[in-house]
Each structure stands twice: as structure tokens, then as C-alpha cells.
């Protein structure tokens, strides 16, 4: 047999005092696979539509009737609401806050307010005076009015509240508003004195 020469390791050990490194670190051939974090997918306002509050009820003062040419005061109520549910397989809470009220009066006119309005009594105003949410119909008739409330949204998956871009709209139920004409007449007697006089 032909004698074999010293191995690289033997040569290295013979020159131990040198700066040679006789043992090389073991290199892993396969990189460790990082565990995938399932995470929560980004939430969009479209994802939250099914959690939206119910539409608000609209009231026209007084008693859903009005007089042509005079203001009818419209009032609705909406408040911040929190709804619990599940999204993408994760439990969550959704908080809706009203930010705008879109009034549709039924005669082609619309307006937007940051509040749902207030009654004449709460405003300490006389009936048929203008308010921020009132509307004057030009002609007598029956009109279908409604209010759609727009909400901003925040979500909480158990780690704190985060805002979601956009708004969710809750459409209100149609409300029938009857508008009448008012006529006045000068008479010589009061209605108590002459009950069948014009205007009595």
C-alpha cells in the first residue's frame, strides 16, 4: 500500500500555535423556515357594512304635517353604537359614530347637517320658524322624506381601537309628510260669534 500523506487536519494540528483555524463552523444547508404569522388582513369599510346600525327614523314637525311656504322642522336621532361580531375568523368589535346626516325632502331638495336637528321646544323657538334642518315646501301635497346617516368606523380585535378609512351609510325609512295650504280672511266677527264665517 502506498502510504498516504498527512491530512489537512493533521497539518493544522502540527502548527497549533499559528492563527490557523482547524475547525470550520458547520454551515446549515437549509435555512430555517420562518413560521408564518397568520395576522389579520387589512380591514376596509366595505367589510364593515354588514355591521352597520339600522337606519334612523325621521320626524317632521308638527306631526309630519306642514304648511306650504313655511318651514317644516325635521328631526332625527342617531348615536354612537358598538357592535360585536366576527370578521376573517377573528372576534372583533366595531364602533360606529354618526358624522353626517343627509336629509332628502321628497320634492327634489336635499341638505346635509352634522347633527340630527332639534325640536322647536328644545330650541326654544316658535313653530314654523327656520332651523338648521327645516325645509319649506312650495306647494301643497304629500311628500316622501327620509334621512340617511353616515357613520365613521373603528375596529378592535382585542388590541385597541383602529380607525377604518371611509364611511358607512345607514338609509332611513321613508316618511310621509303632508303639506297643506293656509288661507286667512278678514271677518267682522270672531269664530265664536260667527262659527260659519270664512276661516272658522
Image (tube, helix red, strand yellow):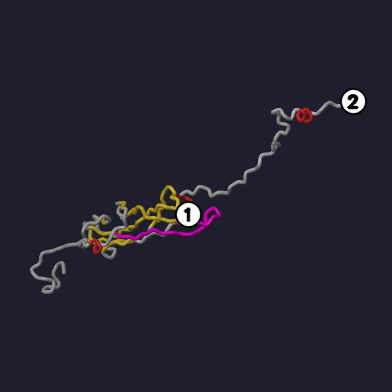
- The spot of residue 29 in percent (x, y) is 70, 37
The stretch drawn in magenta includes residue 114: no
Q: Nearer the viewer, mark 2 or mark 1?
A: 2
Q: Which residue is mark 1?
A: 156
Q: Residue at x 42, y 52 (%)?
A: 153
- The spot of residue 154 in percent (x, y) is 44, 53
Q: Neighbour class for label 1 at 10 Å: few (<14), some, many (≥20)?
A: some
Asked if residue 110 shows in the view, the reply is no
Q: Is residue 39 above or below residue 14?
A: below
In 3D space, how far apart are the residues under numbered discs 2 and 1 (Cα atoms)?
78 Å
Q: Is residue 20 above or below residue 121?
A: above
Extreme-front residue of the structure:
17
Q: Which mark is residue 2?
A: 2
Q: Quadrant of residue 188?
A: bottom left
Q: Neighbour class for label 2 at 10 Å: few (<14), some, many (≥20)?
A: few
From the image, give the main secondary structure of the stretch colored magenta.
strand
Tag 1, which secondary structure?
strand
- The spot of residue 96 in percent (x, y) is 41, 56
Q: Quadrant of residue 184?
A: bottom left
Q: In the visual, does 8 lie left or right of 180?
A: right
Q: Which mark is residue 146?
A: none
Which span of residues is magenta-colored? Answer: 74-92
Amino acid at each position: 500500500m502506498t502510504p498516504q500523506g498527512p491530512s489537512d487536519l493533521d497539518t493544522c494540528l502540527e502548527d497549533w500555535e499559528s492563527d490557523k483555524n482547524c475547525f470550520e463552523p458547520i454551515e446549515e444547508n437549509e435555512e430555517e423556515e420562518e413560521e408564518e404569522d397568520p395576522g389579520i388582513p387589512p380591514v376596509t369599510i366595505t367589510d364593515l357594512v354588514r355591521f352597520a346600525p339600522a337606519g334612523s327614523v325621521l320626524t317632521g314637525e308638527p306631526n309630519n304635517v306642514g304648511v306650504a311656504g313655511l318651514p317644516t322642522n325635521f328631526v332625527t336621532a342617531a348615536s354612537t353604537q358598538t357592535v360585536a361580531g366576527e370578521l376573517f375568523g377573528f372576534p372583533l368589535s366595531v364602533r360606529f359614530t354618526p358624522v353626517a346626516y343627509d336629509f332628502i325632502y321628497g320634492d327634489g331638495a336635499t341638505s346635509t347637517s352634522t347633527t340630527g336637528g332639534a325640536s322647536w321646544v328644545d330650541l326654544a323657538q316658535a313653530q314654523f320658524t327656520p332651523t338648521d334642518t327645516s325645509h319649506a315646501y312650495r306647494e301643497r301635497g304629500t311628500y316622501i322624506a327620509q334621512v340617511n346617516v353616515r357613520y365613521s368606523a373603528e375596529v378592535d380585535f382585542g388590541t385597541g381601537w383602529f380607525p377604518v378609512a371611509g364611511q358607512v351609510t345607514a338609509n332611513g325609512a321613508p316618511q310621509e309628510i303632508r303639506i297643506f295650504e293656509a288661507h286667512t280672511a278678514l271677518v267682522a266677527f270672531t269664530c265664536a260669534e260667527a262659527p260659519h264665517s270664512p276661516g272658522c
